[in-house]
């Protein structure tokens, strides 16, 4: 029928189940590469078993996104469910006499509670220093552009690598936890309410979620 829109990525034909998704078929990324990226993302033994089980499911779904690209966002949704389960479990563990119905509802409220209780802190995130370094370099680049030193499109100038002391100062200016509370909750809500987003972000997203959960149970 003319003008009809077709659903992309329908159910695989049985003889194509084990073929790479078309988005990976011509890339340099192999399923072994994806597995190597996911394997080190591990929750600590202090995290409750149901949470770890759910998170492993998220990892497996992420791995199989190599075959079905749209599994990336499914994997993220499962990972956020594991994060919410972890936060709820920790809340009840820390407040054993509370009415379970009084548990903060929704991922954002639970993350805000974790922030208030300092279950998650800026200094404990592994990517903090890299983020601070990148911010310094971005400012340095903007200053160079605004200075007018570069006269033509082909001109270039060497960037100065930030000193560790400068990175320390910059790191203290960044509220990583506040950003996580806002952004992770928004991403999860977007997915939960029928997002059309499609990208290959699940591995990096799972890595961040694992860091949050491990901090909550550290």
Image (spheres, rainbow, N blue to C red):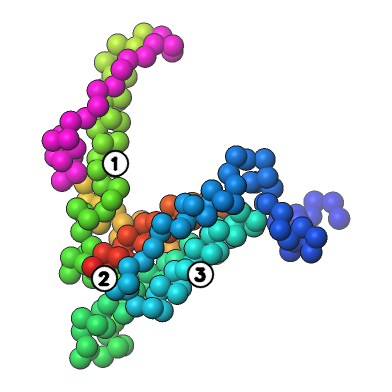
Residue at (28% x, 30% y) in the render? 137
What's drawn in magenta, residue-wise?
152-172
As measured in the structure, the alpha-carbon distance from the residue carrying label 3 to the one carrying label 1 is 29 Å
As measured in the structure, the alpha-carbon distance from the residue carrying label 3 to the one carrying label 2 is 20 Å
Question: Which disc is residue 57 wearing?
Answer: 3
Which quadrant is the C terminus positioned in?
bottom left
Q: Is residue 200 above or below residue 156?
A: below
Q: Do the residues bearing badges 3 and 1 touch, measured as CB atoms within 8 Å?
A: no
Question: Residue 99's x, y, as percent?
Answer: 26, 90
Q: Does the segment drawn in magenta span residue 141?
A: no
Q: Is residue 15 left or right of residue 107?
A: right
- Closest to the observer, 179 or 97: 97
Q: Do the residues bearing badges 2 and 1 touch, measured as CB atoms within 8 Å?
A: no
Q: Secondary structure at mark 2?
A: loop
What residue does disc 2 label?
217
What residue does disc 1 label?
130
Q: Indicate which disc, 3 or 1, sits on the residue closer to the N terminus.
A: 3
């Amino acid at each position: 029928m003319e003008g009809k829109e077709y659903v992309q990525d329908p159910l695989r034909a049985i003889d194509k189940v084990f073929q790479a998704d078309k988005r990976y078929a011509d890339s340099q990324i192999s399923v072994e590469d994806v597995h190597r990226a996911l394997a080190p993302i591990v929750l600590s033994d202090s995290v409750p078993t149901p949470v770890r089980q759910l998170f492993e499911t998220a990892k497996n779904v992420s791995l199989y996104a190599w075959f079905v690209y749209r599994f990336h966002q499914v994997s993220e949704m499962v990972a956020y469910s594991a994060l919410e389960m972890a936060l709820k479990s920790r809340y009840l563990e820390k407040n054993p006499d509370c009415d379970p119905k009084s548990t903060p509802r929704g991922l954002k409220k639970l993350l805000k509670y974790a922030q208030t209780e300092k279950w998650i802190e800026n200094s404990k995130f592994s990517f903090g220093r890299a983020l601070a370094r990148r911010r310094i370099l971005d400012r340095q680049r903007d200053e160079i552009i605004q200075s007018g030193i570069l006269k033509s499109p082909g001109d270039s100038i060497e960037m100065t690598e930030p000193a560790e002391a400068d990175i320390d100062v910059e790191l203290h200016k960044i509220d990583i936890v506040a950003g996580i509370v806002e952004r992770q909750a928004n991403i999860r809500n977007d997915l939960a309410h029928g997002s059309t987003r499609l990208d290959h972000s699940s591995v990096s997203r799972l890595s961040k979620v694992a860091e949050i959960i491990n901090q909550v149970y550290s």
